[in-house]
Image: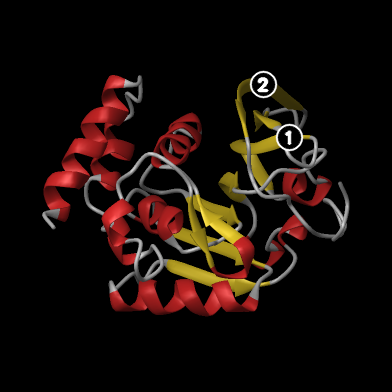
Amino acid sequence: MDFAKLRAEMVNDLSNRGIRDTAVLQAMNTVPREQFVQEGYEEFAYYNGALPLPAKQTISQPYVVALMLSALKLQPQFNVLEIGTGSGYAAAVVAQMVRQVHTVERQEALVDYAKVRLQQLGYANIGVHLGDGTLGWPEAAPYDAIVVAAGGPTVPVSLREQLGVNGRLIMPVGSYKKQKLQLVWRKKNGRFGQKTLTPVRFVPLIGSEGWENGDQ
């Protein structure tokens, strides 16, 4: 299959659907998504939909990845935190645009899955960590941007606290199965602004400041 052609078609579709951030589009036209999907799903790598991963998780649809990253207004000097590593695809896209990415995953199988792929592709500015994503990764805080690839009832306090001044955070917030993207930013006075964006459906954010396993 001509993955380069499929990748270019995906990016063109994203642009037609309203994604205007050229850095995000360029990064998504660079990262080989077929390397991150499970074996046997390569032909669907550039289909605009979620695909299954180990541990009953999913790799998010490209449009949602692009939408979330565009909202963060990423810059080359940024230090970025991702919650919910999954396959490692979104971290790879972010790493094309910023100085450093730290990504936290609670499923050990996915930590290994992502590390193998990111190392094979030569990403040196991504740290993949096993842990409770609702607590963030305080060792490398503060962050200029935080992206959360799982839905929770509220934005965890720990993540807000790890956001730097003028930093932006995007996360699906709502019920266990249906959410809306929420954009949060830290003002110079330390207070937070927020804005609700489009409806989405993400896997639940499990952890001490999210859902408990088994919540509905």
Q: Is residue 109 left or right of residue 27?
A: right
- Mark 1: which secondary structure? strand
Residue 170 locus on image (x, y percent):
61, 37
**Element under label 2?**
strand
Amino acid type for the residue under numbered disc 2:
Thr
Compared with 174, 1 (above or below) is below
From the top left corner, tell me how far across and down residue 42 is, in percent.
30, 61
Say if mark 1 contacts mark 2, CB within 8 Å: yes
Q: Position of residue 178 (x, y in %)?
A: 71, 34
**Which comes before the other along the chain, label 1 or label 2?**
1
* Front-most of residues 192 and 129: 129
At x 28%, y 46%, the residue is: 27
Vertical comparison of 197 with 24: above or below = above
Figure quadrant of residue 20: top left
Above or below: residue 117 compared with residue 73: below
Q: Quadrant of residue 62?
A: top left
Disc 2 target residue: 196
- Image point (34%, 67%), residue name: 40
Q: Residues within 10 Å of mark 2 (few under 14, many from 20)?
A: some
In the picture, the disc for residue 173 is 1
